[in-house]
């Protein structure tokens, strides 16, 4: 049943210590749980209700004696407990079956090794407990298992004892020096090897860092270790936060529902975010590993030392930790332009995924008000939009002010389970004179109101007064359960340019008063406007002509900016804006405008000239620019995603969107042919592989050039470039170059794609993460006459396909349903039939993964006919199934609502 935020009540009992003893056996693991429990003096006396799921209960003892208990649904209820405030011993003995745990929540077995995943509510699948984050306890954990099969036994904290047992078994005992909520509990037992690194912190303390993997994977752990060391050093320098453990462990598993998990001192990772060497991982993989390793490490403070009071506060730790990992990745990128590239990539994710979520049936505030299944709320809204809210706080109080706020946050709340209000209050209280402190209750609407605000800008120029006026108005569309929205606090960074692209000083007129902040004596070239009303006007003086405004620089707020730029103004910004984000944005606006105009027309898309000569010329000059970074060029030349274009339309014909985007790509490929040849020649050779931002950018641009040359070859019948590309698949010296080449052939639909795929498969058949790429590339390929779905169905029969492995399921099924709209939205609805079959099939195995797939059709109401009706039918088919998991039921019920 639905859980509501307003129903929060503190726990009736507290658990001070937990002593867990595991006899590990895949078929039947025995768990002895001895807790010291006491009544919470602040809560009226009531029975103790412990959560448990799929457990076999064998024994319950209170202070060593039998006691009466009952089982109500998934709860163990104890009514006759000792009265008074004194602690008592509660001993619970249960068994569970890790080998049968296909949900990968709780204790499970992956390739013969035991792992746990407890966030959000997996601990109750291990033992009966108060499974909520505001119950924090000290843990002692004893693991017993067969020595030959499970030589490595790990849990949180420090190893205090280990030894032999009879019958070939052995044991290890771990004590975690830090109190923690049970969602941070972890254990691992199996055949693993570790890369080890000893480090000395700034405080002079020694730490042991370990990365545990399967024996053959040790040569793929160097990058993760480097990333971990860099993250540790960064958090000390940037926020004064040091590692608080003698030992910090990362363990990789190939069966994992999400990316990774920040269990105290024992992070468990999807192999995808740990393992990399130049032969098997791409630049993108390297970057993801750097950021996920850092993210989980940063949780040690933001999440573990200070945790969430309840799961509605999830963004307290996730928004803040994503913000921190984004800042870290920017610092690691180095140059200002490489930092900007990372920012653009983050915004692109936010705008394509989170904006769509925010306008669909799953829209929810960053701090949700209700849920049926909390796992459905590990979303881009809670994570990425949550990070933007923290970023806006940073913008409003400045870098030093933000650091002071963080310091105050830890002074106040270290060791506690708190709320997002507590965090925002700390940042504001440390900066009492800031706009954040002045407007805190209003700022908090960002946490409570769902939906993406729109800000529309109108300008007026008065030549006689030499005054330029900017009127900003905000609004926010209704979302489920929230028909009306109050105004937000929206920081808008602004600069002005003249028609030659020269920056203009921003002189705010006297009567603009408090609306704009003055930051110095000379008129600055950039200002931060803070929009707080529904409508506000800002004046700028001393201007001879209407300027070109660069608004929302650096994407200073997670909003949609509606401003009717002329093409000429966008071309000026694309050529001259000193803010790389808005420079990129100018190109996106130009190209999106052309695409949407064409989509809305009834012109034939095949061979159409969607882009006009001026836009093409502007793109060409970016590509040929002597000073811009390759990575930035690649971003500018990347066409807006089909899903992004679809979101801009009221009614979507997905085939039309696909055809128009393909036509634009063909046009870029043909009209800039010489430039692509040039780009390839200039960027193809990058020496020995290093995953740094600069050489990664060069490889990305070279890869894009190859794709364009292969696409052009399809039209011209050229055989030279596809031949060279095929050769590159065979000869490349790293995975990035090899995969770019393979993907160029597949994207172009060239006849050489088939032998190239076979060659690639043969080379990497023993590398699961590479085989995932091989599946994903084929399932994500541009559709030609409906050929992708039959291929996907055929690949499901491939001996390497396994629906139980989340990475593999995602690589084939999600790549088709969630990431290939042109192939998925078939007029014959066969894509939707496939989708509903897979959702139901997966739901019986792993509801969390099934629920993610279930979201593939949530924007069905935007579709034109016949897709709209077909999609509704497919969703209804899923919804009609009797015992659906809560996870899938919540998604399909919301999708079908009103
Ligand atoms: N806290 C983890 C991370 O962001 C995510 C774990 C979510 N797992 C889940 N089953 N909901 O870093
Ligand atoms: Zn996280």
Image (tube, grey):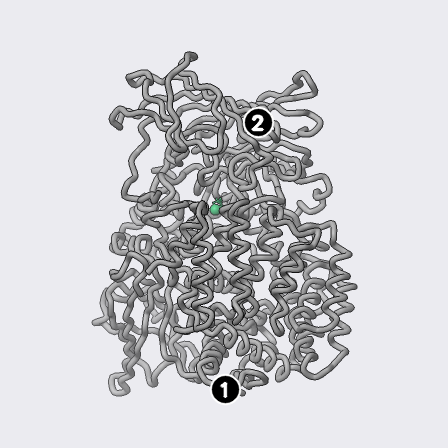
Residue occupying the point 52% across, 74% down: 655
Is 22 situated above or below 121? above
Q: Position of residue 811 (x, y in %)?
A: 61, 56
| Furthest residue toward left | 511
**How far apart in space, not on screen, are marks 1 and 2 (Cα)?**
65 Å
Sequence-wise, the earlier of marks 1 and 2 is 2
Q: Is residue 169 left or right of residue 239?
A: right
Q: Position of residue 196 (x, y in %)?
A: 66, 37
Ligand 1 is within 8 Å of the C-beta of the residue at disc 1: no
Question: Toward the viewer: 511 or 705?
Answer: 705
Quadrant housing residue 408: top left
- Which residue corresponds to mark 1? 603
Question: Toward the viewer: 494 or 666?
Answer: 666
Question: Toward the viewer: 46 or 869?
Answer: 869
Is 275 situated above or below 521? above
Q: Is residue 718 visible?
A: yes
Q: Position of residue 372 (x, y in %)?
A: 38, 46
Q: Is residue 327 left or right of residue 43?
A: right
Q: Position of residue 12 (x, y in %)?
A: 31, 28
Secondary structure beneath disc 1? loop
Q: Could you tell me which quadrant the N terminus lies in?
A: top left
**Label 1 neighbourhood size at 10 Å, few (<14), some (14-19), many (20+)?**
few
- Which residue corresponds to mark 2? 29
């Amino acid at each position: 049943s639905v859980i509501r935020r307003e129903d929060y009540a503190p726990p009736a009992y507290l658990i001070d210590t937990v002593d867990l003893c595991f006899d590990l056996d895949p078929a039947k693991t025995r768990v002895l749980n001895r807790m010291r429990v006491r009544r919470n003096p602040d809560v009226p006396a009531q029975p103790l209700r412990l959560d448990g799921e799929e457990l076999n209960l064998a024994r319950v003892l209170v202070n060593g004696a039998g006691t009466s208990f009952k089982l109500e649904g998934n709860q163990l209820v104890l009514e006759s407990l000792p009265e008074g405030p004194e602690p008592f011993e509660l001993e619970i003995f249960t068994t569970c079956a890790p080998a049968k745990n296909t949900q990968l929540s709780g204790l499970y077995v992956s390739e013969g090794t035991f792992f746990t995943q407890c966030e959000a509510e997996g601990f109750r699948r291990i033992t009966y407990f108060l499974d909520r984050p505001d119950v924090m306890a000290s843990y002692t954990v004893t693991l017993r298992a067969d020595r030959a099969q499970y030589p490595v036994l790990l849990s949180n904290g420090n190893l205090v004892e280990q030894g032999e047992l009879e019958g070939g078994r052995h044991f290890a005992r771990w004590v975690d020096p830090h109190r923690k909520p049970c969602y941070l509990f972890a254990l691992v037992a199996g055949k693993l090897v570790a890369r080890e690194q000893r480090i000395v912190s700034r405080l002079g303390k020694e730490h042991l860092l370990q990365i545990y993997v399967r024996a053959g994977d040790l040569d793929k752990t160097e990058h993760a270790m480097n990333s971990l060391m860099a993250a540790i050093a960064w958090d000390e320098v940037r926020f004064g936060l040091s590692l608080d453990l003698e030992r910090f462990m990362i363990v990789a598993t190939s069966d994992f529902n999400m990316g990774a998990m920040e269990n105290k001192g024992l992070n468990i990772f999807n192999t995808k975010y740990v393992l990399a060497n130049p032969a098997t991982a791409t630049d993108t993989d390297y970057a993801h590993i750097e950021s996920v390793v850092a993210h989980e490490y940063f949780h040690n403070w933001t999440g573990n030392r200070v945790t969430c009071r309840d799961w509605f506060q999830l963004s307290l730790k996730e928004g803040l930790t994503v913000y921190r990992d984004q800042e870290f990745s920017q610092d690691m990128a180095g140059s200002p332009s490489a930092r900007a590239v990372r920012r653009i990539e983050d915004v692109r994710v936010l705008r394509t995924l989170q904006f769509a979520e925010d306008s669909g049936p799953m829209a929810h505030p960053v701090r949700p008000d209700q849920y049926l299944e909390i796992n459905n709320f590990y979303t881009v809204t809670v994570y990425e939009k949550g990070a933007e809210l923290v970023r806006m706080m940073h913008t409003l109080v400045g870098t030093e002010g933000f650091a002071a706020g963080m310091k105050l946050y830890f002074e106040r709340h270290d060791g506690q389970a708190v709320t997002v209000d507590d965090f925002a209050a700390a940042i504001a209280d440390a900066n009492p004179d800031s706009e954040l402190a002045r407007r805190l209750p209003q700022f908090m609407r960002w946490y409570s109101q769902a939906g993406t605000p729109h800000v529309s800008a109108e300008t007026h120029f008065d030549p006689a007064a030499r005054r330029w006026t900017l009127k900003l108005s905000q609004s926010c569309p209704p979302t489920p359960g929230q028909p009306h929205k109050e105004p937000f606090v929206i920081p808008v960074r602004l600069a002005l340019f003249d028609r030659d692209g020269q920056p203009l000083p921003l002189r705010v007129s006297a009567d603009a008063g408090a609306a704009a902040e003055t930051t110095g004596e000379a008129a600055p070239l950039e200002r931060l406007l803070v929009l707080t009303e529904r409508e506000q006007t800002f004046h700028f003086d001393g201007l001879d002509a209407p300027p070109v405004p660069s608004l929302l620089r650096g994407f200073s707020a997670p909003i949609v900016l509606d401003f009717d730029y002329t093409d000429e103004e966008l071309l000026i910004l694309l050529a001259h804006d000193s803010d790389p984000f808005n420079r990129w944005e100018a190109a996106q606006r130009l190209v999106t405008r052309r695409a949407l105009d064409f989509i809305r027309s009834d012109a034939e898309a095949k061979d159409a000239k969607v882009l006009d000569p001026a836009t093409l010329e502007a793109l060409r000059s970016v590509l040929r620019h002597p000073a811009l970074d390759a990575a930035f060029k690649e971003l500018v030349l990347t066409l807006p995603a089909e899903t992004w274009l679809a979101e801009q339309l009221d009614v979507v014909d997905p085939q039309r969107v696909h055809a128009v985007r393909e036509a634009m790509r063909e046009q870029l490929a043909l009209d800039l042919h010489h430039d692509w040849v040039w780009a390839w020649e200039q960027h193809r050779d990058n020496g020995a592989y290093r995953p740094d931002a600069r050489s990664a950018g060069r490889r990305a641009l070279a890869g894009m050039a190859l794709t364009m040359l292969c696409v052009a070859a399809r039209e011209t019948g050229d055989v030279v470039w596809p031949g060279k590309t095929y050769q590159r698949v065979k000869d490349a010296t790293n995975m990035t170059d090899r995969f770019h080449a393979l993907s160029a052939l597949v994207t172009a639909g060239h006849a050489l794609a088939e032998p190239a795929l076979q060659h690639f498969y043969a080379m990497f058949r023993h590398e699961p993460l590479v085989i995932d790429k091989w599946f994903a590339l084929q399932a994500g390929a541009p559709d030609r006459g409906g050929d992708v779905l039959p291929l996907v169905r055929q690949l499901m029969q491939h001996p390497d396909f396994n629906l139980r492995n989340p990475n593999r399921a995602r690589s084939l099924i999600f790549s088709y349903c969630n990431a290939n709209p042109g192939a998925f939205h078939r007029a014959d609805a066969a894509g939707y039939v496939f989708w509903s079959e897979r959702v139901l099939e997966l739901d019986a195995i792993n509801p969390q993964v099934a629920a993610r797939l279930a979201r593939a059709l949530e924007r069905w109401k935007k579709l034109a006919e016949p897709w709209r009706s077909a999609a509704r039918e497919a969703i209804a088919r899923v919804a009609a199934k009797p015992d659906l998991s809560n996870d899938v039921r919540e998604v399909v019920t919301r999708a079908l609502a009103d």
